[in-house]
Amino acid sequence: MGGAGRGFGVRRVLLPLLLLSAVPAWAAPAAPARTFQAQALQERVEAIFAEAGPGPRFGLLVETIDGRTVVAIAPDQRFIPASNTKLFPTIAAFELLPQADQDTGARVILEPARKGPPDLVLQGRGDGRLSSAPDCRTNCLAELANAVAARTRVVGDLIGDAALFPDERWSQGMSWNNIPTSSGTAMAALTLDRNEVALRVTPGAPGQPPRAELSPYFTLDNRALTSAEEGGEPLAVHRLPGSRRLLLTGTLEAATEERLIRLGIDDPAHHAAWQLGRMLEERGVRVTGRIVSRYREPGTGMVREEERGPAIAELSPGPLLDELTTINKVSQNLQAELLLRRLGLVRGQGSAAKGLEAIRSLLELAGVDPNAVTLADGSGMSTYNRVTPRATVGLLRWAAGRPWGAEFRRTLPIGGIDGTLARRFQGGALRGRIFAKTGSLNATNALAGYLLTRSGQTLVFAAYANDVPEGVRATLLIDRALEEVALSDGAVVAPAQQQQAVAALKAPSSEGIVKKQ
């Protein structure tokens, strides 16, 4: 648990009721001053993390907004950041992408066919907010269906076009078992309803299968049972990658309320086109051909817009700021991956690799050592990602000084108030006073952002726990450590206060001297 910044040049003995008449080498202002309060805070935080016992690795760096260290524990070790990764593409978006409305909304195009009626293309342009919900108010697929019905009553093929980005539906290093879930759903330039569908399960009669409600896009083999008693195998959904067949197993207690299970989709463009086809049928528009999806192979160029047919209608999804807020507040994986590809369009053709290049350039601009950060995705689902607490804090401090710094901070969850921190910091000193991005993967927890001390000073921090054994609640330890920091204002000394403290130590006193050794 040894942290950087703990040691002093010589051993110190403080005798009671005596004042310092000379400043030893370890107190020289050339190095960042570590007060006795700061040293005690460091030790208290280390003691909190030590409660986890052997096994987990903790990293924590807390700095003032001007870069002075408050607490440092393994600040240069590399950790898996989990969804803390989302800080990197969202900060890059504030710096590199315009914050006005983006030309990223889906549109419908009539594309000439070799014979027969023209094909209808539903083209995605990188936005992740297209919705088919009955109560949809903005960015609605129904609006595009209405435009098509007003233009024609028959089309050939119905094509879901996701060719804006290369076909990289899953990030490198993501666990395969996440693919059937909403957390690991496939990424594409055309997605609908966050590329997930809901399976609603309610109890049936004891001994009978529960009732299941699911979109007909999937087929369901319901082998689960309703149980009058507690216990039994838990309810589980099984799906092989690439398959649209679901297997429901396990038991559901009769007293249980509805269970909502969100499922991922492997072919986002096809699902979006399929849903549009259903809407067109309701409006009297016939699809005489097939419903197919279209992707772009990695390494190939984009189709020029003039080669497509005329656009019937297109949607405006709203400001980028709204999307960045969703990504950070609720840790939305799909939209974070789409954002990474949009960053990849700044200097390339929308690949994840080009997006990561943009982030690497941003780190250099921010004065962060790029070798302290290794990223494989934009969402944090990849276990290949590695960051150091110092790199994350450095980027956050840089972001705080940018013209958009306050807006960025408002995208972060607020402790005890909203987002993924709504249930944390409920009753302590940091309720409403910590603004930070969470992260959680198997055996991994993370939290990084800004906090306000008891006196209102802003601190920047990054906390990571890796290799966490089952039964160890690392998030509670991290939260306690940050509460300790927030309450320890004596460890946070402003430069002017440091000068006053040194002057006071040098001042002569008739009350005695401190012996040094």
Image: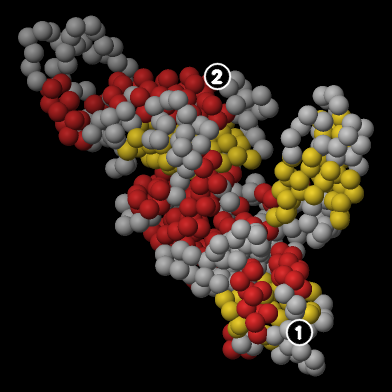
Instruction: Give 370 or 161, whichever is nearer the viewer.
Output: 161
Q: Which residue is mark 1?
A: 154
Q: Residue at x 7, y 9 (%)?
A: 510
* Residue 128 image position (x, y, % from top left): 59, 62
Q: Residue at x 61, y 22 (%)?
A: 54
* Residue 126 image position (x, y, % from top left): 58, 67
Q: Quadrant of residue 299?
A: bottom right
Question: Where 219 sits versus 115, above or below?
Answer: above
* Residue 223 image position (x, y, % from top left): 91, 42
Quarter of the image for the C terminus: give it. Answer: top left
* Residue 71 image position (x, y, % from top left): 39, 30
Q: Residue at x 53, y 52 (%)?
A: 327
Q: Earlier in the sequence, mark 2 or mark 1?
A: 2
* Residue type indicated by callout 1: Val
Q: Is residue 64 left or right of residue 29?
A: right
Question: Where 287 sits versus 484, above or below?
Answer: below
Q: Give the colouring mode of the picture.
A: secondary structure
Mark 1 neighbour density, 10 Å: few (under 14) some (14–19) many (20 or more): many
* Residue type indicated by callout 2: Glu
Of helix, strand and loop, which one carries label 2? loop
Q: Which residue is mark 2?
A: 51
Q: Residue at x 49, y 40 (%)?
A: 418
Instruction: Give 124 or 465, whichever is nearer the viewer.
Output: 124
